[in-house]
Each structure stands twice: as structure tokens, then as C-alpha cells.
Amino acid sequence: MSSFLPQMKSSFFSSCVCALLALVSLSSVAQTPGEWVHSRGNEAMTGLSPVELRFPLELAWEFKLQDKPKGQGEMLVSSAVVRAGKAYAGCKDGKFYALDLVTGEKKWEVTAKGAFDGAASFAGDLVVAGCQDGFVYAWNAETGAEVWKFETDAEIHAASNTWTDPKTGVQKILIGSYDYNVYCLDAKTGKKEWAAETGYYINGGSAVGDGMVVFGGCDSVLHVHDVATGEEKRQIEVGSYIGNNVAISDGIVYVSHYGNRVGAYNLADGALVWEYGEREFEFYAGPAIWEKAVFVGGRDKRFHAIDRVTGAKLWEYRSRDRIDSSAVICAGKAALFGSDDGYVYALDLKDGKELWQYEIGAAVKTSPAVAGDYILFGADDGVLYCFKNAAVK
């Protein structure tokens, strides 16, 4: 722990500076729609946005991606991503959409032979997403024309993540499949660069940090690989099924899992730093990291704030049902997430007090997309909801 603390202090200062610079940049282009090019805010999947929320958020538009089948209990709409004034999301009936961010008008749609569960990512002129028909698809983000597709040997439920090689500037797609592999693909061509085999299904996205890509799945193991070469560096036994992405920050990997716990592990040697969990309920939502805290919802109907250094509870907020939605931390002030109780929430990071809530009326399992003044949630009624920041007073 002693080597961890100085590193964190330095990184916290850098993170604050970066966030402030991002806020200044956004304020200089007020009313211009922003972007959300990573489904969890960045390659490391820490769930951060520089956007400061202004309450109450107002419903700007809603778009029905599909009708809800009777008896449907699974997530119908993927988490959205946003670039160049368009929002992109897929749904359970095999359609993938590009919508105007401001109006919700459909720009294009494509249809595949399987559901789109995982969020898309961007690379160059492309938007890339995995499908349950076993293919990774890359479309021209402007027109929807298919540019390439890559076939795996099983369903794809995981989110796509785009990594840019800092040495070459070349972009790669990282995505897991139910064929037990995580693939690294050339973003321009879809050609396989490498594949990393695991022991079972991969559901969550692959996080990138400190030159490593880290992912977990149904084999209850965190797999750590060199992101450039695919070389395995280590395996970290977690002991239970991992249903979502991990997050990487300051040399530490944070993971929530079905063993009813949230854990922090040292990326360098795999050592357990701490473990948190007070009740016998699973964690499905991915963790979000901001400064000295980890934020994550649980199936105990509570949203948890955890001390990053000690793993101690800072505060918790109780909703009316389980929380599978991975939160986004906005401007270091508010945690934004949905719940199976049919509400979306914003909480004060300092004490967990409620800042805003809105009743959608259907379970919200997706992670929000925060793009400038626009905030998007997909719900289990098959609808993508877009909220807008309140006007500047």
C-alpha cells in the first residue's frame, strides 16, 4: 500500500487538472453538442465525464428502437455512444441506429441476424459493434454503409472498445466473444491482430490502462495482457463470475462481481489491495472511479461509494430495486445511473444525497451517455431517452 499512495496523490492532481481543462474547453462551446466516444468515458472504462449537470434535466426526446415482447426480462437497448452530432445504439431485435443527437431523428438503421447488446465504439470514420450473430460489424458512421465485418465462433454480448497505439497512432478494436476469446482487430480492415483465450464466456468490455488490456468473464478470472502484442502477463483469480467491464486507474484494477463483492487489485503483481461487500447480493454494474472513491450500484438495491485506498464504505443510497446500470461521474460532482425500479438518478458525490430523479417506468440497465448538454439512457421498454441540461440561468 505504501507505494500506491504517492502514486495516487500525483495522479489525483493530474486528473483534477485534466478535468478542469476539459470543463473550460466545453464552456467555450456552450450549446454545441458534445461527444461520448467511449461507452464508459475512456479506454480505461472509469466512467468519467467532464460535463457539469444542471438540474432539473429535461426530457428532450425519446426514440423507440423496438417494441417490448411479452415476458421479456433482458436488456432491450444497448448503451449509447455519441460523435459528430449523432447518437448510436443497438437493440435486441437486431437493429442498430444512428440518430440525430438534438432531435432524435433517425439518420440510418441497419439490421443483423442477432441482438446488439454491447455498446459500440468509434475508429476513424467507422462505428463498430458486436452482435449476437457472432460478427463484429464496422459501418461508415455517416452513411451506415458496411465497411467490414469479422466473424467469431459464438455470440457477442460485450461492448467494443477502441484503443489507439500511442507509438503509431493506429487504432485497434478490442472485443470479447462467447467463443471464450477477446479479439484485437485492426480498426480499418477488421483483420485479427491477436486473440486471447479465456476459460469461458466474455460479457463485459475490455479496459485499457498502463499498456495492459484487462477483462473478466464467466471463468471468474481477471486476464491481464499486453495491449499491443496480446501477450499474457498474468491471471488474477477473483473467485466469481464477472458480468461487466472492469476499470483501471493508477495501476489498480477495480472489479465488481457475482461473489457479492467489489475488489481492487494491483495491476503489476495481481495482489489484492482490498475487498468490499456487506450483503449477500451480486454486483453486475461496472465500477466508476473518481479521485479517492469508487462508485458502483448493486443488486442489494443500493448505490455504494467506497474509499479507494481502504475499501471502507463512504456512503450508500437506497433505490427501490436492483442497480445494474454502470454510473457515470459528471464533473466530479454527481453520479448518474439508472435502476430496475424504472427511475434514473443523480446523486451528490460528497454525501450521496439525491440531486435529481426521473421516472421512466421501465428498468434502466444501461450506462448513460453524457454528450455535452445531452444525456442518453436506454430502457427495457425498448426506448432510448434523451435528456437535456437545464438552461443556464
Image: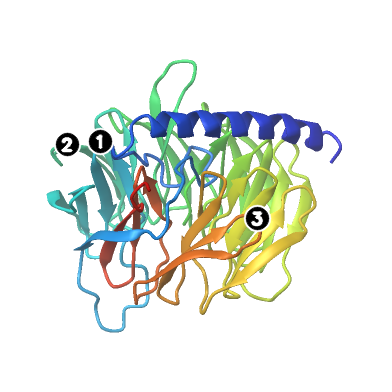
N-terminal of the pair, mark 1 or mark 2, is 1
* Residue visible at 79% across and 36% down in the picture: 4
Q: Residue furthest right?
A: 2
Q: Nearer the viewer, mark 1 or mark 2?
A: 1
Q: CA distance from mark 2 to mark 3?
A: 41 Å
Quadrant of the rendered structure where residue 1 is? top right
Q: Nearer the viewer, mark 2 or mark 3?
A: 3
Q: Secondary structure at mark 2?
A: loop
Q: Nearer the viewer, residue 337 or 263?
A: 337
Q: Nearer the viewer, mark 1 or mark 3?
A: 3
Whole-percent x, y for residue 223 in the image: 60, 45
> Are circles 1 and 2 on residues that touch, CB within 8 Å?
yes
Q: Which residue is mark 2?
A: 142
> Is any atom of residue 334 visible in this view?
yes
Quadrant of the rendered structure where residue 51 is? top left
Q: Is residue 276 left or right of residue 61?
A: right
Q: Nearer the viewer, residue 21 or 191?
A: 21
Q: CA distance from mark 1 to mark 2?
A: 9 Å
Q: Secondary structure at mark 1?
A: loop
Q: Nearer the viewer, residue 95 or 196?
A: 95
Q: Which residue is mark 3?
A: 350
Q: Which residue is mark 1?
A: 84
* Numbered mark located on residue 240 in the image: none
Q: Amino acid at mark 1?
A: Ala
Q: Amino acid at mark 3?
A: Lys
